Amino acid sequence: MQEIKNTPTRIPRSKHTFSRRNMSPAALNVLYQLHKAGYQAFLVGGGVRDILLGRIPKDFDVVTNALPEQIRSLFRSCHLIGRRFVLAHVRLNKEIVEVATFRAHHDKGSGGGMMEDGRIVRDNVYGSTVDDDAWRRDFTINALYYDISDFSLLDYAEGMTDLREGVIRLIGKPEQRYKEDPVRMLRAIRFAAKLNFTIAPSTIEPIPKLADLLADIPPARLFEEVLKLFLSGHAVESFVQLRQYGLFKQLFPYTEACLDDPVSLALIEQGLHITDKRTAGNKPVTPAFLLATLLWPVLSRSFPDQHVKGINRQEMLLEASQQTLAKQQKYVTIPRRISVLIQEIWLLQVRLTRQRRGKRFLNVIEHPRFRAGYDFLVLRANTGEEKMLEFSQWWTQYLTDNKSNQELSQKTSSKKHPRRKQKSKQA
Ligand code: ATP
Ligand code: MG
């Protein structure tokens, strides 16, 4: 078990490779301003970890001994957010830096913390020192602190060794730490997939047994985690490992039940692969396309693929799609702005596969989601839905022959939904 050391290893500036030049100017500015005002200030978490690994951090998290109100009075544009975990969002030059007051372990402080059956439901026990704060961090590689006062690094839990050796290791007793916050199970997989690290045996071992604790997590928080798992460029690897340790079925139980069917599995694997390729190429990826893919096998099982006389397929599909989304929402929230798009992609599957291809049929090209619908049709055709091949080839040919139409439809579909920056919060 990896304990937190009472006295961290302090690595002086001359002995480490972390450089301020790799931080965003806004994060650096926040650190300096806190320091100038007489507070302690550290960069912690992914910002330190990723820079040490030569990667570009997604965001920068700052911790300080200043209390939320004191942080607020120091910066011109600053909002306090969250209840479960109060945080200051400092906005500088359009960038947001998250600033948190040191937290302490729950048995140390009093007042702001709340536990229910070993689970942290509120985490506002302020600690007075950075030593206190290190206890609540999840993994050793996330408990490295960069001290703006002398540019040294503080290593509380042999994080530098794990970083070098490529290991994801929980701090403290794994079972207890997962019970405090089951989302840490998803985070272990996410970091392993993202960094291509291995998970320490003691950290992975309890996961299958504790996976069902995710049922206690609000579906809205799981939605944020799902986006991070599947839209950060490592969706395929995350999917494989989530399934391997029994976590995927906690998030998408109905999808999991379809995965014995090779066509469904291929659709999802290929959909995730395309998502990763787009991320690698800096192309936008939309939660709607991802979720439309993950839930298509569930939907298509409740919808006959044959044309049934006298039945309006569009209406049937609409009803089936509403049911599919409603059952999934009990596990992972899908905000309305996204579920509307998912349904559009699904409903386009009927419009794109009509037998008669007259003028009315071609109107579908004006649909704002035409491109996503077409891409989805191609994905289905290429992953084993053979009946779709003819349609996908027909459309591909049509689009090649009518390039100007194609450009028009691309413009409309990309304009409507720019990628939204997702950010969820800590435990
Ligand atoms: P990334 O931003 O790349 O997803 P990160 O490690 O910075 O990775 P954040 O969610 O931004 O992750 O959290 C910042 C830091 O807060 C983490 O590095 C970790 O120290 C701590 N943290 C976040 N979530 C938890 C949690 N559920 N339990 C314990 N510590 C957490
Ligand atoms: Mg972060």
Image: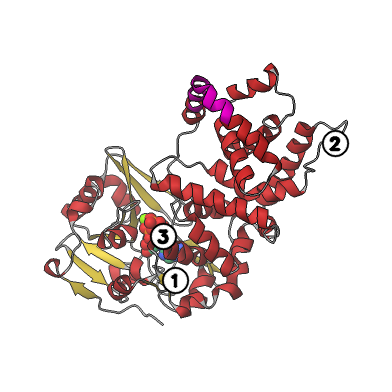
Label 2 to label 3: alpha-carbon separation = 46 Å
Q: Residue furthest left?
A: 14
Q: Which numbered circle lies on residue 106?
A: 1
Q: Residue furthest top?
A: 359
Q: Is residue 388 left or right of residue 180?
A: right
Q: Which numbered circle lies on residue 194?
A: 3
Disc number lying in front (1 or 2): 2
Location of residue 315 in the rendering, given as x and y in whole percent from the top left corner? 78, 32
Q: Is residue 184 left or right of residue 259?
A: left
Please name the amino acid that badge 1 sits on.
Answer: His
Location of residue 260 in the rendering, given as x and y in whole percent from the top left corner? 69, 61
Specify whether tag 1 is near ligand 1 (CB below 8 Å): no
Mark found first going from the N terminus, 3 or 1: 1
Location of residue 308 in the rendering, given as x and y in whole percent from the top left corner? 85, 36
Q: What segment is highlighted magenta in the picture?
A: 397-410
Q: Residue at x 64, y 20 (%)?
A: 363
Please name the amino acid that badge 2 sits on.
Answer: Val
